[in-house]
Image (cartoon, grey):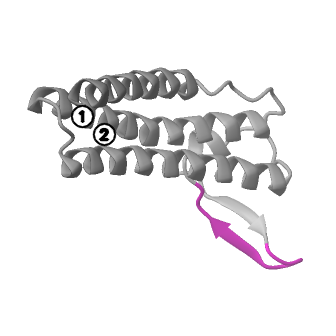
Amino acid sequence: MRIEIMAHGADDPVPTRRWPRRVYEVGDEPDPRFTFANERTFLAWIRTALALVAAGIALEALEIPARTGVRLTLVLTLALLGAISSSVAFFRWARAERALRQSKPLPSPALAPILALGLAVVAVVISVVFITSV
């Protein structure tokens, strides 16, 4: 295990461990503003994941007027999108942080098209269920 030494004062080195090592062992420290912006983006993806899971729970709790199979499929789709979002958020953060440290272009958000398509399908199915139940 590698321990990085960062100078805290002129004669006061403080050992620190930074994880994940595959991110922090490369390149140079970026401007802290970029690191904080990357962290805020990560937290936004986490909030999105939480909202998707909450929407799935709400959909089940409201018992929309649909067959149980349709409702269960919608609930599971929203929960799965939430799980994917939270998982991919970490890897996106790590890839972006690594790119910042190496002064490379930031990676594209691969999760955005998946979420957009998944939510569009859920919205269409919910709309059809509500229209046919009226």
- In front here: 81 or 133? 133
What whole-number distance in Å separates the C-alpha atoms at marks 2 and 1?
Answer: 5 Å
Apparent side of residue 56 relative to residue 37 in the rendered image (left or right): left
Within-10-Å neighbours for mark 2: few <14, some 14–19, many 20+:
many
Residues marked 2 and 1 touching at CB (< 8 Å): yes
Q: Is residue 16 magenta?
A: yes
Q: Position of residue 24 (x, y in %)?
A: 66, 46
Apparent side of residue 68 relative to residue 74 in the rendered image (left or right): left
Q: Residue at x 61, y 58 (%)?
A: 3
Q: Which mark is residue 79?
A: 2
Up the image or down, 74 lies above or below 41; here it is above
- In front here: 3 or 49? 49
Label 2 residue SS: helix
- In front here: 130 or 54? 130
Q: Residue at x 80, y 26 (%)?
A: 105
Type of residue at label 1? Answer: Leu
**Which quadrant of the figure contains the C terminus?**
top left
Within-10-Å neighbours for mark 1: few <14, some 14–19, many 20+:
some
**Secondary structure mainly formed by the magenta segment:** loop
Up the image or down, 108 lies above or below 37; here it is above
Q: Which residue is mark 1?
A: 76
Apparent side of residue 57 relative to residue 106 in the rendered image (left or right): left
Number of marks drawn: 2
Q: Position of residue 76 (x, y in %)?
A: 24, 34
Quarter residue 70 falls in: top left
Q: Which mark is residue 61?
A: none
Extent of the magenta region: 8-18
Type of residue at label 2? Answer: Ala
